[in-house]
Image: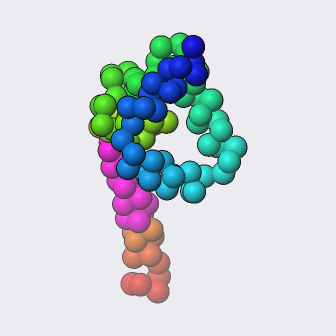
Amino acid sequence: MLEARRREVLEGVPEDSWYKEEEIALQEPKAERLKRFDDALLRLEIGQYGFCASCHQEIEEEWLASLPLIRICKRCDTNAEWSGVIKQLRQLRKQREKKSQHPLWQ
């Protein structure tokens, strides 16, 4: 059953999306990739594949087609990216404040 569903999902994926998936694959260890595949198969089995792990809304079809192993929707991914950017900016600001309070800078 899972194998048939996997084939069905893969048939609906545009060919150019594999480029993105390969790009991601090159950046992560083999064990991590296998874990992502297993996770996707489990989500298929329990009926949660295609739903965002963060907001629980349905993942956009184009987003899922281009990244079939993705667990979060585009909106949540963007929010997470912005959260990371904001966190980095706050850290830089703290570093700058520490430097400005250093006796050599006064």
Q: Main secondary structure of the magenta part?
A: helix
Q: Determine if residue 72 is in view.
A: no
Q: Which residues are magenta?
A: 77-94
- Classify residue 65 by image quadrant: top left
Image coords of residue 10 (percent x, y): 46, 32
Q: Quadrant of residue 9?
A: top left
* Left or right relative to 89: residue 10: right
Q: Quadrant of the N terminus?
A: top right
Q: Is residue 86 magenta?
A: yes
How far across and how far down the image is residue 50, in percent? 40, 25
- Residue 79 in the image, given as x and y percentages of width and height: 32, 42
Q: Is residue 29 magenta?
A: no
**Is residue 17 or residue 96 the one in the foreground?**
17
Horizontal and vertical percent for residue 13?
39, 37
Q: Who's the residue at 30% across and 31% down the image?
A: 60
Query: Please, is residue 25 above or below residue 79 in the view?
Result: below
Front in this rendered view, residue 9 or 101: 9
Judged from this view, the residue extending furthest toward the right is 31
Q: Answer above or below: position of 84 versus 79.
A: below
